[in-house]
Image (tube, coloured by chain):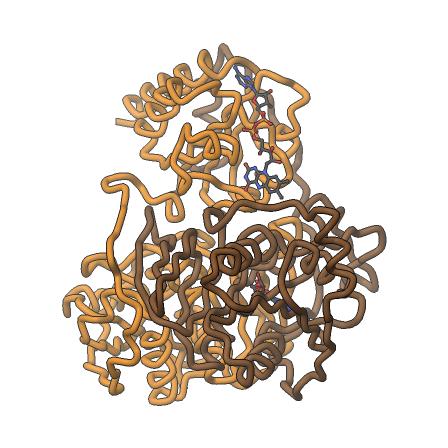
Chain colours: A brown, B orange
Amino acid sequence: MKILVCISQVPDTTSKISFTDNNTVFNGQGVTWIINPYDEWYGLVRALELKEAGTATAVHLVTVGKADVEPVIRKALALGGDEAFRIDSDSNDPYVVAAQIADFAKTQGYDLVLCGKESIDYNNGSVGAMVAELLDMDFVGFVSKIDVTGGAVEVSREIDGGEETDTCGLPVVLSCQKGVAEARIPNMRGIMAARTKPLKVVAPSGAASLSNVASYEMPAAKTGVKMISADNLDELVNLLHTEAKVI
Amino acid sequence: MSVLVLTEHSQGVFKKKSLEAVQYAAKIAQDMGTTVTAIAMGSVGAGEMANLGNYGATKVLHTTDARLDNLSSKAYAKVLAAAAQKESAKVIVGTHDTTGRAVLPRVAARLQAGMVAGAVAYPNLSNGFIVKKNVFSGKAFANVSITSDVKVIGLMPNTFQVNKGSGTASVENFDCGLSDGDFKVAVKSVNKASGDVPLSEAELVVSGGRGMKGPENWHVLEALAKELGAATACSRPVADSHWRPHNEHVGQTGGTIRPNLYIAVGISGAIQHLAGVNGSKTIVVVNKDPEAPFFKAADYGILGDAMEIVPKITEAVKKFKVNQG
Ligand SMILES: Cc1cc2nc3c(=O)[nH]c(=O)nc-3n(C[C@H](O)[C@H](O)[C@H](O)COP(=O)(O)OP(=O)(O)OC[C@H]3O[C@@H](n4cnc5c(N)ncnc54)[C@H](O)[C@@H]3O)c2cc1C
Ligand SMILES: Nc1ncnc2c1ncn2[C@@H]1O[C@H](COP(=O)(O)O)[C@@H](O)[C@H]1O
């Protein structure tokens, strides 16, 4: 079984978010870039576990991005994986990203494609299902458990107010979240090994973007907290009714 | 031309977030000078479908295949894409939830339609087609311009208040030739907390963090939630310590919610926690530490011990309800 893990690069969760050029460009200055946590902690680690268990024969990593994403994909390789592919394209529109991944994957014969539940920068959660559509594969989203036996996959996925266990065949695209695996820390051996692992650059296909960010906005600042005395909680309830109008 | 909406129902009753999506679609249709066609999947009754007229739908296309009672992203996408073609739809709306996020991107890719996932406002049609969405886990918004002919929007649930109007939608059967290959994902079992308000749809949420000290103290939060008719949530360490089930965990690695009221008790307000709740309309924070970062993101704050304050809030709510009659 061959597994493809989709890896995106995102700003570290604690990054200060700001914009330049009249709020049209994300300001990357001083930002630390990391592997999208859902891709690193869940999809990638589960793929490695399946390889270690002998279920998977190969684990490939793919990222869509320009040369500046290479340090992050190297970091992913340090955790494990046999080879990595960088598709040399902009990654601003989810359709473009998905089309690149699908175009690359369709000749590789992957049985399982793992991605994260969403990228923590644009919070879309769109790429995985788009890839599935373009490859005419099944897709299950928000999975928290993946078991593979023979040609059958059993997954648990989030539903409104609970969880559902599904069975499906291969090939399938899954979007991973908490529960799928436990995060790992790369060790020295992995870091050394990653240096010599192949990172191939793939030419992009010509998919055209269908959307773009016209501008960014910051949320309106909170006007400041109104402190209420612990001895006057009727006042709180009153304000929630008359001022906030939420009860 | 029309605006299509993907609806979701639970045992034949449309979910509130789908009524919200229909209403949202109706406003877009009005702005574009067209009408709304809702898509209903599987076992749902004619009366329930006709009632979507109360929220602005003119027509409902009903695909009756009972296999659609379980989500199959492939089958759903096929139905939606076929309906979009039949109706010459220019805009397709759904909900930004586990169903919408499995189906809408598929439809978008199939139709080569640009998509905005997690819209928080009506599209601005004055200069193209621009939709506002959350980015960077609620730390900012992006105004995304969709440049394709057909557009797909996943609406963040609880963005708009749902108002029931009056109207009746016509209902038509819609068959687009689903095959066995569209239903290869089979449900083995479902594990659902029943009776409670589902967190993702809740308008009021009471949430606890490590400051609650242990699961044995949760009864005070549950009592307040019950009095308010609220759902309960928690911070990540609370779920990690198994004080509460994982589906209650909100934040960057948990659920994202936008209730009208979020009451955070004994939660410090780490940035990763705020990422899941900063879309809440009103935030109340109870914390014993005046320096807790959450106070900066709050509308109302109460300084003090959770075990003392929360029961007092519950009492105050009780009293308020009696006074309101
Ligand atoms: C990549 C990443 C992702 C993460 N994702 C999430 C996520 O999705 N969700 C999430 O919640 N966290 C997440 N975290 C963890 C987050 O950074 C915080 O550690 C966590 O939110 C803290 O939980 P807490 O506020 O319950 O606990 P603490 O930080 O321990 O805070 C407890 C609070 O309770 C107060 N308190 C103590 N006793 C009382 C009392 N008797 N009465 C009233 N108040 C009291 C204290 O003053 C304190 O403010 C993530 C972290 C990382 C690095
Ligand atoms: N540029 C990219 N390269 C490779 N995979 C990506 C890229 N962007 C997104 N993905 C994958 O798709 C998932 C969902 O991303 P998104 O739709 O951007 O929220 C991520 O968790 C990744 O697994």
Q: Residue B160: which quarter of the image?
A: bottom left
Residue B13 seen = yes
Q: Taking B168 as reference, is A30 left or right?
A: right
Give residue B259's position: percent from left, percent from top: 45, 43
Query: Considering depth in this image, is A13 or B320 the residue closer to the camera?
Result: A13
Q: Residue at x 38, y 63 (%)?
A: B99
The image quadrant that residue B226 belongs to is top left
Identify whether A214 is placed above or below A36: below
- Tell me if I can see residue B126 in this picture: no
Seen at 48% across and 78% down, the residue is: B108
Q: In screen coordinates, is B325 left or right of B125?
A: left
Q: Quadrant of the C terminus of chain B?
A: top left
Residue nearest the viewer, comparing B240 with B110: B240
The image shows residue B266, relative to residue A212, as above or below, that is: above
The location of residue B132, given as percent across then percent down, is 59, 63
Q: Residue at x 60, y 32 (%)?
A: B269
Q: Nearer the viewer, residue B210 or A105?
A: A105
Ligand 1 occupies quarter: top right
The relative height of residue B268 versus residue B246 in the rendered view (above or below) is above
Q: Is residue B284 left or right of residue B230?
A: right
Number of numbered discs overlaid on the protein picture: 0
Give the quarter of the figure containing the N terminus of chain B.
Answer: bottom left
Question: x%, y% of residue A142?
Answer: 44, 57
| Residue A37: % across, % down | 61, 52
Which residue does the image show at 24% across and 58% down from the upper left?
B188
Where residue B278 sits, quadrant-wise, is top right
